[in-house]
Image (tube, grey):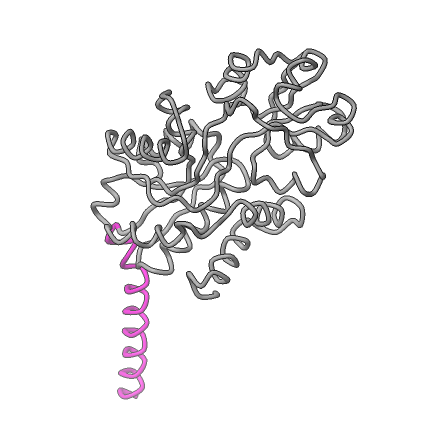
């Protein structure tokens, strides 16, 4: 009987050690939170960042995806509600700091400089430039002979623009288009990114602000107009992280930089389409990509 009790307590002790080991990271405070904005691409990239950290460290990772627009995510980072998330060079320079952008290289340099002043660190660009653009249906392009933004100016007062809520007010959004092109639409309808394309093909709006990597561009066979005055800055995607987090866990820089140069515009458009057209989950799409790229092992 005593031998059985000893065996039983031995098993209990072993189980307790396992449980303590599994929870040691969380109990010691070794945890981080990864956030994202409120659109498909940003959510996918955030899951990639979280998967990489989980695969290559013993940190506990919390995911706060779909927080809201750019300013919401940025504020969450500043307030330490999240410690990292994916953002874009043009958004950082033009929207958060309201400074002039330039070429991709110049905007990246400015991003590094400005974020460092606020104890943030921008890491390696992932390889795709998700610039804003304006999209119309083929029918609208043919009806008004639209190829460039300048072509659109002459008929913009007859058309309705559907755009994200923040695009209506951002200096690198509609106000900037008005100033640079003298482009003034008959009406501007703010809406969530997810419903813009459906609104376009159903005729509720005539023009939408799209991202160059939007999967719906292919799905709906849309026409992308040329920004002939090069108003929109480069929007190179990269991880941004708090410097105090990086000081605490310096290995995160090398881990997150595994994504540097690994995703081009065509790749990202395809990943977005898997979610928006085929109905796959963002975390599954992210995981599958990392496995196929040899950056993590399949779960």
Q: How many labels does the image show?
A: 0
Which residue does the image show at 62% across and 50% down from the upper left? 274
Nearer-the-camera pick, 161 or 29: 161
Which residue does the image show at 26% across and 43% down from the upper left? 245
Q: What is the x, y in percent for residue 183? A: 60, 13
Q: What is the x, y in percent for residue 159? A: 70, 16
Which residue does the image show at 27% across and 52% down from the upper left? 30
Q: Over which residues does the magenta segment extend?
A: 1-29
Nearer-the-camera pick, 27 or 299: 299
Seen as rendered, the residue at the extreme left is 247
Direction from residue 246 to residue 93 in the image, left or right: right
Nearer-the-camera pick, 240 or 100: 100
For residue 97, above or below residue 291: above
Direction from residue 156 to residue 25 in the image, left or right: left
**Magenta region, main secondary structure:** helix
Q: Does the magenta stretch include residue 5?
A: yes
Q: What is the x, y in percent for residue 156? A: 67, 15
Which residue does the image show at 67% across and 24% down from the upper left? 207
Which quadrant would the N terminus be assigned to in this image? bottom left
Q: What is the x, y in percent for residue 63? A: 42, 46
Nearer-the-camera pick, 185 or 141: 141
For residue 108, above or below residue 261: above
Seen as rendered, the residue at the extreme front is 228
């Amino acid at each position: 009987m005593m031998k059985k009790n000893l065996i039983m307590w031995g098993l209990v002790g072993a189980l307790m050690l396992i449980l303590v080991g599994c929870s040691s990271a969380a109990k010691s405070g070794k945890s981080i939170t990864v956030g994202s904005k409120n659109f498909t691409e940003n959510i996918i990239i955030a899951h990639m960042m979280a998967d990489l950290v989980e695969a290559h460290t013993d940190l506990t990772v919390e995911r706060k995806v779909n927080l809201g627009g750019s300013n919401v995510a940025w504020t969450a980072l500043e307030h330490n509600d999240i410690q990292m998330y994916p953002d874009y060079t043009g958004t950082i320079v033009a929207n958060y700091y309201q400074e002039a952008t330039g070429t991709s290289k110049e905007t990246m340099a400015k991003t590094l400089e400005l974020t460092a002043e606020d104890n943030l660190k921008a890491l390696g660009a992932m390889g795709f430039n998700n610039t804003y653009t304006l999209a119309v249906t083929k029918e609208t392009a043919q009806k008004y002979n639209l190829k460039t933004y300048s072509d659109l100016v002459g008929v913009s007062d007859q058309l309705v623009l559907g755009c994200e809520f923040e695009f209506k007010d951002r200096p690198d959004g509609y106000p900037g288009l008005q100033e640079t092109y003298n482009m003034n639409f008959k009406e501007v309808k703010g809406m969530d990114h997810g419903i813009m394309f459906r609104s376009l093909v159903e005729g509720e709006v005539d023009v939408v602000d799209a991202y160059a990597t939007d999967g719906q561009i292919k799905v709906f066979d849309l026409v992308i107009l040329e920004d002939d005055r090069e108003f929109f800055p480069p929007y190179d995607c990269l991880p941004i992280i708090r410097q105090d987090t990086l000081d605490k866990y310096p290995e995160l820089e090398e881990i997150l930089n595994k994504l540097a140069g690994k995703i081009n515009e065509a790749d990202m458009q395809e990943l977005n389409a898997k979610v928006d057209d085929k109905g796959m989950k963002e975390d599954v799409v992210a995981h599958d990509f990392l496995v196929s790229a040899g950056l993590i092992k399949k779960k």
